[in-house]
Image (spheres, rainbow, N blue to C red):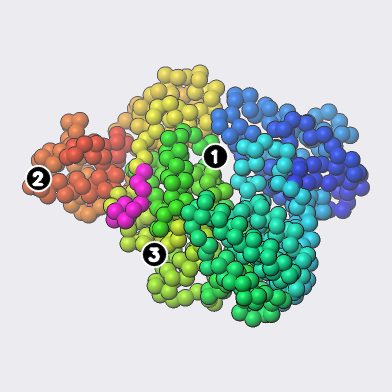
Amino acid sequence: MSADPARPEARGPVLRFELLGPVRVCRDGAELDLGFPQQRALLALLLAHEGRPVPTGELLDLLWPGQPPASALNVVRRYIGALRRLLEPELPPRAPGRRLLRRPGGYLLDVTPDEVDLLRFRELTRQGVRAAVTGRAETAALRFTDALAQWRGPVAMGVAAAAREHVRFTDVCRELLRTARLAGDAALLSGRTAQVLPALRRATALDPLDEPLHARLILSLAACGLQAEALTAYEDVRRRLAAELGTTPGAELAAAHTRVLRQDVGRLTAGPRVDLARESPVARVAGSGVAAAPRGDDRAPGAALAVPERTAPTGHTGLPPDIHGFTGRKAELGWLTATRDAVDGTVATPAAVWIGGMAGVGKTALAVHWAHRAAGRFPDGRLYVALRGSDPAGPAAEPEEALRALLTALGVSAARMPTGAAALTGLYRTLLAARRVLVVLDDAAGTEQLRPLLPAAPGCLALVTSRHALPGLIASGARPLRLEPPPAEDAREMLARLIGADRTAAEPVAVDEILLRSGRLPLALTAVALRAAAHREIPLTDTAAYLRETEGTLDAFAGGGGTADVRAAFLGSYRLLSPQAARLFRLLPRHAGPDLTPASAAALTGLPVRGARRLLAELAETHLITEHTPGRYTQHRLLRAFAAEAPRR
């Protein structure tokens, strides 16, 4: 984003971009015709990225949420060209322009902060937060009110409803709600509740089930002398919670109602209720707004919780970016959504889902992709922790380490971080009480590692991935989802996405052999596809021939420079085995039959059948073999190749 006053645009026509309501562009006060709805949606996404490049894949997902047509890239280029001419009509033909810029892998809209309502909203919100944390509640209320004045209606209005469900637009909606909560807090402190009432009413209409927001509206109505309306507002949300979620008002909303009944509402003082000035500095998360960090004991009406959003994968708690070109798994995605809908706030205990399967089958990819798709159903945030349960480079994460990372993401400062597993778990579950948060616990080592990390509040969902079967977690009520390699059609589509549909269509026989030799394992396909994409001059027939020549080894699936490496992934599972199970695993390539049984395992190891059965169960628990029927096991072809070269332990 450029703010250079000497830029040619600054001396030319004045452009104004609007996203917080109808998507509009005005030049010198005159509204421009943005053309096709898809073109308007593309512009809206560029604006929502706040001057950062938008990957082409994200543009394709926005315009074609299902399967993009073969002409999709050409269509995007046409829309970009039309928008470029619209914004800079004086440009010569084929000139690159200075507004809509091509960047590696995507496009960037170059704007200044004063040109875009979203950027003005964010800057005013930041000013309000700075005033709040330094004790200037009246100034904070004014800044938050000015920020919310930029909001003119549903975000990205005029864009197709399906496109408005994109995570970038739902993130902006959550920003508006957070700022409305902060505005309510500051107004109650400073006595300026009348100024924020319109924004609070609009915000509660945007999310009719947001209890903290309704608590602020009810208190603000009462502070303005509108006690009857405040009681009516409480009764409306109480009925809605019962009808839609089957729940009663939580502690915060109930406390606000009690205060209205007692007529204990007026201009608040900087005491134990809502003391913004004593809050720790506000953390800006993922470039998408702000939220006040909580005191560990502050759950009264007005206390705000930092809402973790999607970030780059740096650290423990940022949800990794969505998987570019994710394909297939439609049944599994549908099952996850149906499970979420079945448990969303309707049961007495929180929900947990276990996604299990062999190394490289795509557990994390599925969990992260679904987490992005389901973001709108978890308005209070999405947390991610890598538990390193099968990391060959080091030990698994300790529960206390993971809890500290989660609490940091929830806004707890180092100075307020408790010590001891019990205190950390208690604070973590308190902060999540009466909230709707998705917690992705990736690569879990076992149930005991997980127990302190599971939320204890209805409305939250823990999404656990692991190579371990985790029977204890399932016995406690977690819903299991075991992944197998995708069917051939999905695997073929994955290859086409990664190396180009034109190449796969031109060499279908080679593609079939690649799928066969890789066992359709997504990690193995990725390793092959990355090499093929980097060497377009090499026919896929040659790639298939190389896989044929190296059959029985993993040489063709080795990665480098941080790319997919099947051998390293399998090693992470192998190192978890007991010495006896590791020995049986190394002996498995000697078994010639299609199925492995306890009797055949006993013959390989020289152990009694009962002992061999126990070792087979251990291998199955870590998904190094598969029990397809009771007492009968098979092994993926690539795991068999790894077993032949696995190091002694």
Disc on the earlier residue, 1 or 2: 1
- Give the class, few, some or many, for how many residues have Cα within 10 Å of label 1's Cα (few <14, many ≥20): some
| Residue 68 percent across, percent down from the top left | 59, 29
Dividing the picture into quadrants, the one containing residue 213 is: bottom right
**Left or right side of 619 for 344:** right
Question: Is 58 above or below relative to 3?
Answer: above
Question: Is disc 2 placed on a helix, strand or loop?
Answer: helix
Question: Does residue 114 appear in the picture of this structure?
Answer: yes
Q: Which residue is mark 3?
A: 452
Magenta stretch: give its range. 472-481
Q: Which residue is mark 1?
A: 324
Tell me how far mark 1 sits from mark 2, CA to CA: 47 Å
Q: Are marks 1 and 2 in contact (CB under 8 Å)?
A: no
Disc 2 marks a residue whose amino acid type is Val
Q: Which residue is mark 2?
A: 609
Question: Is disc 3 placed on a helix, strand or loop?
Answer: helix
| Residue 26 percent across, percent down from the top left | 85, 42
Disc 3 marks a residue whose amino acid type is Pro
Disc 1 marks a residue whose amino acid type is His
Disc on the earlier residue, 3 or 2: 3
Question: Is disc 1 placed on a helix, strand or loop?
Answer: loop
Dividing the picture into quadrants, the one containing residue 349 is: bottom left
